[in-house]
Amino acid sequence: QLAPGGEKTSDLQIDTTDRELVIGGLRPPSPLGTHHTLLFRGASGANAIYASGVGTGELRFPPGKAMKIPKGQLIGLQLHIFNQTDQMLSGTSGIEMMEVDPADVTEEVDMFLPGPQDLQLAPNAETTASGSCTVKSAYKVFALFPHMHQLGRHLKTTLTVGGVDQVLHDDTYEFEHQDVKTFEPIQLNVGDKVTTDCTFMNTTNQTFFFNDTATTEMCY
């Protein structure tokens, strides 16, 4: 339950897996008031497995692809809830894992978060922030989760593959509709790049910085 105007940014649940999990998809139950959920390996949240925001739907991995979490692995769920209504909110948020047969798996899935963290959004101004990651080992990408907070207006993701730019996503951003974008797998090799450009509109008299609360910003 959460009182009107209330916010909890780091409601953590930590557990240890009692068996190997072979996951073919993830689904985030997210009633009103769910700002985001984060599933991660370990206890700190640094090694993310999956994230969802407002309006994020189910993500099913391509055939033969799965995420493997070994028996005995410490995993955590971080829940961020924010009540912008004048009523008490009550509900159950989380992440559902859809398991598949290990015999059907040919490639493993993981998650990474490419984007700038040195955000500084000046008052009463539009700001575009950019961040670029260089690929250190070969892998394929098949899904994208554009994520900003309430000042976000536009997000662009560009892959640089073999020196050639390929725009993966270039669209307006709506905080209430944070869909996962899926596409045919694209091969990335060592030296390729992933670049994220986020445009924000700060109409307040305050400077906004990077963090995971509803009154700060992100760019992934």
Image: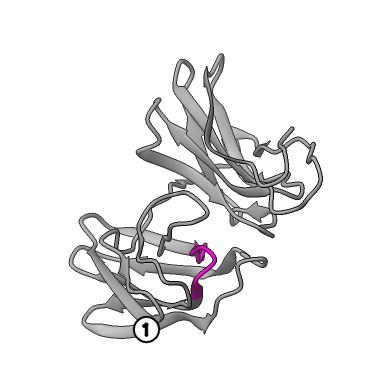
Queried whether the magenta region covers residue 147, the answer comes back as yes
Q: Which of 90 and 71 is in front in this view?
A: 90
**Residue type marked 1:** Gln
Point 64% across, 53% down: residue:
60
Q: Tell how many labels.
A: 1
In the picture of the structure, the residue carrying the numbered disc 1 is: 166
Query: Is residue 104 placed above or below 159 in the rendered structure?
Result: above
Point 35% across, 66% down: residue:
207
Query: Is residue 200 placed above or below 95 in the rendered structure?
Result: below
Q: Is residue 19 found left or right of 28 in the rendered image?
A: left
Q: Which of 73 and 53 is in front in this view?
A: 53
Q: Which of 55 and 210 is in front in this view?
A: 210
Point 28% across, 78% down: residue:
160
Q: Is residue 163 visible?
A: yes
Residue 54: x and y, percent? 65, 57
Queried whether the magenta region covers residue 36, the answer comes back as no
Residue 159: x and y, percent? 34, 76
Q: Is residue 105 found left or right of 216 in the rendered image?
A: right
Q: Can residue 159 be seen in this view?
A: no
Q: Quadrant of residue 208?
A: bottom left
Q: Most prominent secondary structure in the magenta stretch?
A: loop
Query: Is residue 12 placed above or below 153 in the rendered structure?
Result: above
Q: Is residue 210 found left or right of 88 in the rendered image?
A: left
Q: Say few, some or many: other residues with alpha carbon within 10 Å of mark 1 (under 14 / 14 to 19 / 20 or more).
A: few
Q: Quadrant of residue 126?
A: bottom left
Q: Which of 2 and 97 is in front in this view?
A: 2
Residue 216: x and y, percent? 43, 57
Point 52% across, 54% down: residue:
214
Residue 10: x and y, percent? 50, 35
Q: Which element is circle 1 on?
A: strand
Q: Give the range drawn in magenta.
A: 143-152
